[in-house]
Image (spheres, coloured by chain):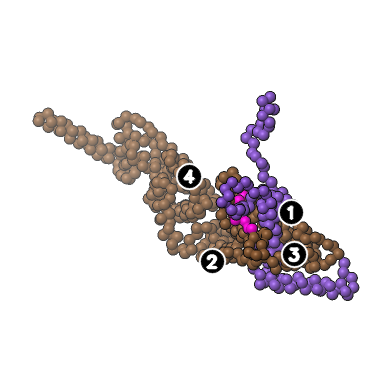
Chain colours: A brown, B purple
């Protein structure tokens, strides 16, 4: 079979073929079967030579049209036969239902006073099978449509993992990306933390580890972060989340905002955590800032600020140094008599001055 | 519809023809594969575990397509042959299934497949040049 001259070019026929789609495989097979049938059609068989005129080639669009007509023919037979079976109160079709459907489609003369089995349709078909040459389909077909067995998702109980939240029962299917064995979870936590989006979250984790008292608080945000990592492991969810995250972390955010971003990601509702998280690093930052800047006149030990407030007081040199000395004295608990330590401090200062004077004298001498 | 014993016997004979035919269908392999027919029948809602019925549908469809193709071949042959200038060329005309022949053949079966004769680029296509000038 060779394709004949297409009308309007190949692209048009390809577009037309695309119109008939839904199941390309079935359509392609039907096309081949119809082409085979057309090839076998013979007209004007000469008795001497036993040869007749046949089709040598087809137009592609003509073949497509004939295939779609044949497919619709099959479908209309099925639809009508099922209709007749339902009318008779049956679910499965009968041979007589098919014969009736064929009569409806105009294949034979429908006669109401004769039995269906004796209809001309059947006779025509019998005649056809007797006359036409038997021509099986050229290809061996696999069984289709292939039904993929749907494996039900394993539940939390089967996987052996505790559900992350209390309200989730054990018999529900596990979340996608849930690891099966428990020890590997903690090992993955480190990987998860390193894989995590961006350096800012890591920088948050370090002060967490530095602050000893907040270790209990650590577990829940880590688990939450791990859960979010598992949720992000789902390929359908990674792409948009990653995009949003990148957009966030490209800009430098103050720590509060980046901390508060975590609870937005995860599913669980832990409103208590953000407050704790916000408070602990704020103390650390306060400490860091306090050490770095000696001009910081005010430091609040007792009251824990909800938000980090950095107040800068820039004053003269003398006054802050005296204040710093006083503060250090109070912290270290050197609570001697008021006059004694003052005298000590003054002597230290005098010694420094003398040292400086000596140095200057020495320099002058040189 | 059928009254009396005589018609009952006739009915049995008619049934026998059909049952015999269905039995003989297992020997005959239709061109259209069984899986394909079963797929399209299931698509339209007809379910049947019996293979013979599916083969019956396949044979009926094959007969239908063959009838259409033979009608198209008749139309193709009936068309006057082009003028053969070269006498050496024999009259072995390559018969091609064209849309024209197919549409004529399908028209008899109630399927209307007609191609437009031309595609108009502008609204004035196909109008007589005399009127177009106006």
Q: At numbered mark 3, what does the secondary structure look like: helix, strand or loop? A: helix
Q: Mark 2 = which residue? A: A158
Q: Position of residue A133 (x, y in %)?
A: 65, 66
In the rendered image, which quarter contains the N terminus of chain A?
Answer: bottom right
- Left or right: residue A13 versus residue A198 is right
For label 1, the residue is B109
Give residue A347's position: percent from left, percent from top: 22, 37
Cα gap from disc 2 to disc 4, whole angstroms = 34 Å
Query: Within the magenta stretch, is there residue A59?
Result: yes
Query: Considering depth in this image, is A213 or A218 the residue closer to the camera?
Result: A218
Q: Which mark is residue A72?
A: none
Q: Secondary structure at mark 1?
A: loop
Q: Secondary structure at mark 2?
A: helix
C-alpha gap between disc 3 and disc 4? 67 Å
Q: Which residues are magenta?
A: A53-61
Q: Are marks 4 and 1 in contact (CB under 8 Å)?
A: no
Q: CA distance from mark 3 to mark 2?
A: 62 Å
User: Local crowd at mark 3 within 10 Å, few (<14), some, or many (≥20)?
Assistant: some
User: Residue at (67%, 55%) from the top-left corner?
Assistant: B73
Q: Label 2 crowding class (10 Å Cα cut-off): few <14, some 14-19, many 20+?
A: some
Q: CA distance from mark 1 to mark 3?
A: 16 Å
Outermost residue, front side: B87
First-in-chain label (3 vs 2): 3
Residue beneath disc 3: A124
Marks 2 and 4 in Cβ contact (< 8 Å): no
Label 4: element kind? helix
């Amino acid at each position: 079979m060779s394709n004949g001259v297409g009308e309007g070019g190949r692209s048009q026929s390809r577009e037309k073929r695309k119109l008939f789609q839904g199941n390309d495989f079935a359509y392609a097979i039907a096309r081949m079967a119809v082409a085979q049938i057309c090839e076998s059609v013979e007209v004007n068989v000469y008795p001497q030579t036993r040869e007749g005129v046949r089709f040598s080639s087809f137009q592609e669009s003509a073949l497509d049209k004939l295939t779609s007509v044949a497919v619709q023919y099959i479908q209309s037979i099925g639809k009508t036969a099922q209709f007749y079976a339902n009318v008779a109160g049956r679910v499965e079709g009968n041979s007589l239902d098919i014969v009736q459907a064929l009569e409806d489609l105009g294949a034979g003369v429908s006669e109401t006073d004769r039995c269906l089995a004796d209809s001309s349709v059947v006779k025509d078909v019998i005649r056809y099978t007797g006359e036409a040459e038997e021509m099986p389909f050229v290809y061996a077909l696999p069984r289709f449509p292939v039904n993929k067995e749907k494996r039900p998702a394993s539940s939390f109980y089967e996987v052996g993992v505790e559900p992350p939240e209390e309200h989730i029962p054990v018999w529900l299917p596990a979340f996608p990306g849930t690891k099966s064995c428990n020890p590997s979870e903690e090992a993955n936590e480190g990987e998860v933390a390193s894989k995590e989006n961006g350096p800012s979250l890591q920088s948050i984790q370090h002060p967490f580890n530095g602050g000893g008292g907040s270790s209990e608080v650590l577990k829940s945000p880590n688990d939450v972060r791990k859960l979010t990592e598992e949720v992000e492991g789902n390929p359908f969810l990674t792409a948009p989340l990653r995009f949003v995250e990148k957009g966030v972390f490209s800009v430098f955010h103050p720590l509060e905002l980046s901390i508060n971003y975590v609870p937005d990601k995860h599913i669980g509702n832990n409103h208590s955590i953000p407050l704790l998280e916000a408070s602990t690093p704020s103390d650390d930052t306060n400490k860091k800032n306090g050490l770095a800047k000696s001009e910081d006149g005010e430091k609040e030990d007792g009251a824990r600020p909800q938000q980090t407030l950095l107040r800068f007081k820039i004053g003269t040199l003398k006054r802050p140094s005296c204040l710093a000395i006083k503060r250090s004295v109070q912290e270290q608990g050197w609570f001697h008599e008021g006059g004694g330590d003052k005298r000590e401090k003054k002597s230290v200062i005098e010694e420094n001055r003398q040292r400086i004077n000596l140095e200057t004298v020495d320099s002058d001498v040189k | 519809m059928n009254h009396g014993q005589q018609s009952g016997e006739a009915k049995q004979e008619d049934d026998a023809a059909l049952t015999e035919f269905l039995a003989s269908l297992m020997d005959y392999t239709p061109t259209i594969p069984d899986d394909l027919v079963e797929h399209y029948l299931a698509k339209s809602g007809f379910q049947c575990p019996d293979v013979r019925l599916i083969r019956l549908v396949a044979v009926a469809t094959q007969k239908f397509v063959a009838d259409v193709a033979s009608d198209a071949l008749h139309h193709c042959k009936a068309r006057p042959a082009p003028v053969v200038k070269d006498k050496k060329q024999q009259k072995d005309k390559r018969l091609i299934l064209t849309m024209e022949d197919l549409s004529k053949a399908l028209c008899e079966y109630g399927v209307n497949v007609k191609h437009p004769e031309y595609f108009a680029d502008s609204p004035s296509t196909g109008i007589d040049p005399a009127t177009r000038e106006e």
